[in-house]
Amino acid sequence: MINITIDGRQLQVAEGTNILEAARENDIEIPTLCYHEALEPFGACRLCVVELEGPRGSRLVASCVYPCEEGAVVHTNSEMVQRSRRTTVELLMTFASHIPLIQDLAAKMGVGEPRVRLEPNDCILCGLCVRACQEIVGVRAISVINRGIEKKVKPPFEVASSICVGCTTCVFVCPTGAITLDDVGRPRPAHKWRSEFESRTCRVCGDHYLVSESVSDYRALLAEEKLSQPEGGRQGYLIETYHRSVSRG
Amino acid sequence: MDESAARIGIFVCDCGHKIADFIDSEVLVRNAAAFPGVVLARRERYSCSKAGLKRIQAAIAEQGLNRVVVAGCTPRTHEPLFRKACEEAGLNGALFEMVNIREQCAWVHGDRTQATNKAIALVRMGVARAVLLEPGEVIEAYVTPAVLVIGGGTAGLTAALAVASGGVPVTVVERENELGGLVSKLHSLYPTGRGAQEFIAGRIEAVQNTPAITVLTGAHITAVDGSPGDYHVTVWHNGHQSILDAGAIIVATGAQPSRPWGLFGYGRPRVITQFELENLLNTGGIAARDIVMILYGRGEQSHLDGLSCMTALKNAILLKKACPERRVTIAFSDLPAGEPYVNWIKEARQSGVSFIRYSPDRKPQVGSEAIEVYDVLTATDVEIPYDLVVLSMTLVARADASVLANLLHLPQDDSGFFPDVYTRLKPRDYADDGIYICGCAHYPVATAESMFQAYNAASRALRYVASRTVSSQAAVAVVDERLCTGCGTCVETCSFAAVAMEKGEGVLNRSRINPLRCVGCGNCVVACPSKAITLQSSTDQQIMAQISAALAGPTDGKPRILGFLCQWSGYAAADLAGARHLLYPANVRFIRVRCSARFDPYHILWALLNGADGILLAACEPGECHYVLGNQYAEERIENLQQMLAVAGFDTRRLRLGWFKPDDAEGFVSEVNAFADQIEKLGLAQHIS
């Protein structure tokens, strides 16, 4: 066990515990945006910074990634910490002031209008979605790409991912509601649904035909017309289509 | 396991204040401790923190717990974490159960007493289920260290050579009597201008000189059995059939040139396709002096693919250079732009090939002596006499592609090619692990890309074979052979070809489920008329125990509403609704199932008999089922059930099947509210007896 002092309270915590966990275990709340219990800590949002007293004065550390050390003295809500957090929230406000979560944080910390305004963006780059996809789902369909102000969360090459399983865990963990599910796949024929009939174009003759449901009519039609053309003709294709839709059907 | 042998530990999570602010955890813990089989009920501040997990592990050891229930947040994010902790403490991960009292209770009801009562009911359901949980096991199977390549063209031969160089024996099955495929009928290849014959002969020779490669020509595949990693492929060869064992299969069956009867006068003696031109170049010279090539994209997407355009440019240059006084004209409506094309177009221009652009609305008319083209650039009709018209036609899927598609369960696109499997939603078909597609079977590609794809497929096949074992940890369906009557209903319903009939003892056949193919959707379990199939971790007993537990508590005069939620749509939407703190009534209890295919009419009847006043079923939207056709089966079953119930005098408005999107929390909540309102208006159900 390790002895640590957080906000004046002498605490004993297990080795390997980080400051954030130690504080939360003991009913000391530290605000976070990018921390999630089921995921490895990431240290992205810098909202969880705490003041760590040291021999050469205090310094700020991100409590979610900083392990507890023997005899450490930590302040989670000192003037130094509050100043840092206010700056962080003000920076978030520059582009995410329309998000209720950020508005709440700003109100709580007394941050008003930010000094600069950037283009509004729902994504605060907390990386929760990326880590959830990787660590919980085990798929790695999305990642953080680019650096600096170009940084964003995207699937590889910014095209619809073929490995995404559509589990929406990313939608669920997103703190700002920036992710929604968009069906970008090619149109899928819904065979047996009463509500949908899909007509498609015959790839050779350009005629339209209907799938499944109307195939029986074609069967009657085909019985009357003998196959006259050697291959690739309309009837040949219709028969092929019919067989395929029946075998799938 | 019965309740007397169960030693259940319940950990009620406060989640800091996030649950404790909305639910009276003390009351919940007190109630939970009284449930049968429970030996420990404890309140935790954060059960998912490192210290919390350690405390759970210590409790497993100290109290000898054989079931662990955590009442806290959603299993969708935290279940793997707790499972792992249980396994570290020596408890099988499948014996862990999670009760979602945060997203689906604390955050969505607004009333502390009601939420607490519901949480007690949810924990009762979780305990009822936990008692019946069975330990899960990992199923492992060996991967046969051999690869089968179907097709002996450029892609097939290249893939075979690459696999053989990785030290794995390969068998190439070719339908024709000669190896070589389409390329062996061509004259030359771009961009090198190298002779196609010379190229493919080199490949064939290399294949024949590699001892690890067995070649079967004039052979075709009639059946594919086995499971991923262990395929048994029946091949007809030389009049007798043999069975080849393979760990992976590479499909390189190629494509065939299209023959556009009637288009641009095709069918006349002097109108041919580029493919036929290549044949002519191979067999002898071309005497024609006036040659017109028409570039034409097919169908609505009349864009020209690079392959047929490059072929035309290559042949135009070749013909012009062979005989400079020859007139070669290319009629086009559109040319591809970009690096390789532009250079070739320039070269064609420099060698004297003329280009004429026609409008897609006014296609060139091929007469008996001349071709009439409306030139878009000069806005005039031009008449070009011809000796030979060459049409650029792209490759189409082989006519027999659907046969292979059925054997290997490959998806086919609208043109009959085998596309990459879209894993997110596999609405039509599926492809196993260990089956890889390359070359023109994929889509029309040039030789260079075909080889590139072949290397890609070979490396993936090698990696798969080198893994030696494949394992499946998913809960799968198992057939009880004593109950199976061999009717085959399960075989028909399985969208994943996981079920097969086997010869059983006596006269009956028996169904057997391949655990490596089974995805655990539960469709066969519901379909089985003799109830011989059970789905691990979602057995009938478990679900019925949950239903009974959900309906057991006091009601305060409110109707009891039960929801069965597909984990991909309804359950995800419910979690999201929780995260957004959207409110709905507390008399709704949800049961999570893997797929709507698991909605069992028997369970619904059981719930109605036990006093449920309304049942809401949440499935994925039509065409979006993650298990191909699960929601479609669910719709049919629920419709039948509703008809039956209507005959029995039951108000079918109490049973509702809805389609949900996983990210549409508002839609979910409004649907739940509307349903709860309706049930409220209908009042308590008359008990069916």
Image: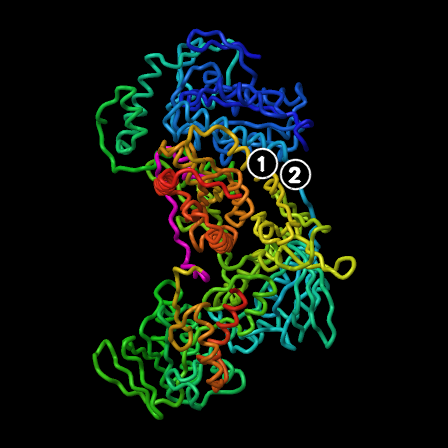
As helix, strand or loop, the secondary structure at mark 2 comes to loop
Given residues B492 and B244, the one toward you in this image is B492
Total residue callouts: 2
Q: Which corner quadrant of the image does residue B509 belong to?
A: bottom right
Give the residue displayed 68% in from the left and 50% down from the top: B479
Amino acid of disc 1? Ala
Left or right of B68 in this view: A240: left
Q: Is residue B515 left or right of residue B622?
A: right
Q: Are marks 2 and 1 on the same chain?
A: yes
Let me know if residue B466 is in the magenta part.
Answer: no
Mark sitting on residue B545: 1
Question: Percent from the top left, x then y, of residue B556?
Answer: 43, 28
Label drawn at residue B136: 2
Give the residues drawn in magenta, as a range. A169-192
Residue A221, horizontal then vertical, whole percent = 45, 80
Q: Position of residue B638 (x, y in %)?
A: 48, 52
